[in-house]
Amino acid sequence: MSQTSSMKLLGARNMSCIVERMEWNNKMDLIAYGTEKGEVIIQRLNWQKIVTFPTPGEDVRVRSLSWQMDETLLAVGYSNGKVALLDAESETIISGLIYEDDIKKVYFSKAINSQENLGTYTCNAKDKHRRFLPKLQPLTNIDPCLKTLDQKSFPKGSPCFLVVIMRSGKVHLLLLGALQAGSIDLTQHILHPEQFDVYDVRLSGDFNGIYALLRDGQELKVLHFHNQVLQECMAPMLELATHCAHILETKNYINDTQQCLTEAWETVQIEMDNKLTKYANSQPYGLISAHFLELHVFGFATLEVEEFLFETLSEKGFKKIANSVDLSLSNLQSLVFKQLNGSAINMFYFLNTIAGFGRMSHFFESLISPDVANEAMRACGAFVLKVHELQRTIDTLVYDMKLFHAWMIFTILRLSHQEIPDDLVLTEDENIAMADFLCAMEPENDDRSDDEDEDANILSATPPPARSKFNLERVGQYLDNTFLSQPYPKDPGQLWEEMVAENDCLNSCNLFVPHDKNLSLIQQRDKMFNAIDAVFHKPTESISGSFKLASAIICGDLPPMEPGEGLKDRDFVTSSYYVNESSRCDMLACTVSWQEAMILEISRTGDCLVRCTRVQLQPGIFTAPLHEDYYHLRFVDLQFYNESSLSMLAQTTTSVPGIRPHSYFVQFSLSAARNQCTQHQMGQVVKLKDATVTHSIHDIADGAAFKGLDGVCEMLAISGSRKVATVLSDRKRKMTIFEMEIEEEEDDTEMSQASFLEISKDSVLDKTET
């Protein structure tokens, strides 16, 4: 047994659920696994559960798991087309993407090396906005149970791609998980779409193309697509993706602020409806306004009004209502003035920066359309104006409400013959404003006689005019997705509006921000979001259109699909991918059949060579006698352990009833097998099945080491950086963990099980026990 295949049992445990997917974190002692219920559980090496994320829906399965390199972020693909990004450190779901089809696989690419891929473009303004923009204040009053799962950014850690592979053959690339960096439909590049299945799609190590392992008819192929835009525009793409991430985060903040505004406004309505509005609705239309005006001007109150003021309200009760309404309106003012206005300014800053990028055509011509970016900036400016308009409307309502509350308390004290404080006595201007407020509660109908109105109402069956509800609708209309019923009144002191209205040149100039007074805040927000989405259509279109099929590698033959079989495979294909940085090559291992696998090493040094090693589990004709089990093995799973080793999971096949199969863990040395490989020149079509020779792994000296396992193992999870291997056996309910490379560390750093668990306790994610 070679050193790299030395193993020591760390522990085994029967799980309380069926495990369908497993994935080790690259850096920390964390393993994530998905259950048959659609849950995702993250635990440590010492079996301590960190967090359990619930299923996103009924009968939803976990299709794929992938950790971001050296980070605590986990991407999860579900059968309902949803991709969730989970943070094990904060134990939260930080974002979600929805696609139209079942997910095949999701994964994070390797980190983008800025020194290798940024080319001539440099930007020294990383996170420069933090120097100019104030930090957005947290939304402490939002109910976390009501928060929507909108897209957020995660610009932490090394930059990388998130790749989403659909079962339909569509592949989506997202840079930093934010910028839609192109997509491709693999069914447009095959000969037999009726017999198609995609097994894996991987980004090349240079990020200038992808490899797609798929079925095309009865052939197993690797299609290599080159992308010129990805090759030439990586640095500008990173710059744009960073700003896209900030924009998406700001969009989510605006949505959350909108939710807080709605909650605060509903509190105001509830407090008013409990007493005041309920009483007003119980009276005939026009009577409340008339009675309150009579009370205000002449000081005379009808019996109904006195009963309402003293028995229903009372001074103490009204003060309680007034304090509650004032507090809610104060929260509303703060949300608009601080959170909403601050986020709108942030959004304008980021869009203005992107518009500036658009003027650097040498770097951003393929990614940004200057006209579209300018239009998004104008839409954001219109949103800023709408926020200011709402702010002035709320300020007016706050003034009116405080005046109304003071007048009501003054009236109650006066009618009850109590001493009236000096601060409750209204000035002449306040009295006039109070009269206007009471008149606006129930505006008069058209100048028609009562008989005409009555006949018209009978004939048309139209309800009476809607009651004003103390002018609350002037603010509430901004929070509805409809046009404003009461536009903001024109300010006679604003000469700019008259100038624009009289000058068509100014009115049509795209340098000025439009102010649409008929749109509500919701409509203006949606208009801005649509304009922002249009900005990021061009990079998607440019990158998607730049995918060119460079080479098709035919790996082997597959059994035909039966009619009506669809995507259900009769063959067995599983694969693993590894980027070898030291030798500048991309490594792909895949099974060709139940007993045969091949390892491709595609060079990235410019010589356009691909090395192929083809191995089988069966002994060859010159193989020395072996143990009986070795004559009846088939593949179950395989994964790259590192650049020089491939870990395999094999199982015996037997037709004897009552005898359970045996499972073996196989560590295959790629360095020993390279003497048996063949080299091929990359071309338009490379037929490896006719130009390679299959070797038995038993005939490769020091090539493979076998270790027998307990139970019938069905799944494998490997972490070369953590030097651990996990197998799943006994109907996917028993998890067994092995420590690898024991002999390699015996001299000075030998680790026992206790020492390994000690590392777990000191992990990056160590949390205080509660």
Image: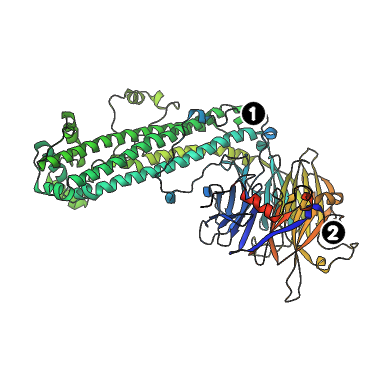
User: Would residue 676 be found to the left or right of residue 192 on screen?
Assistant: right
User: Would residue 39 be found to the left or right of residue 479 on screen?
Assistant: right
* Whole-number angstrom distance, CA of label 1 to CA of label 2: 50 Å
Give percent across and percent down for residue 539. Answer: 59, 37
Q: Which residue is mark 2?
A: 696
As helix, strand or loop, the secondary structure at mark 2 comes to strand
As helix, strand or loop, the secondary structure at mark 1 comes to loop
Q: Is residue 663 above or below residue 277?
A: below
Residue type, numbered disc 2: Ser
Q: Is residue 59 above or below residue 465?
A: below
Residue at (24% x, 45% y) in the render: 321
How many neighbours does mark 1 have within 10 angstroms: few (below 14), some (14-19), or many (20 or more)? few
Tell me the tag on residue 121: 1
Give percent across and percent down for residue 6. Answer: 78, 55
Q: Is residue 16 above or below residue 367?
A: below
Along the line of sight, the residue nearer the viewer: 751 or 664: 751
User: Would residue 314 be found to the left or right of residue 261 on screen?
Assistant: left
Residue at (74% x, 62% y) in the render: 559
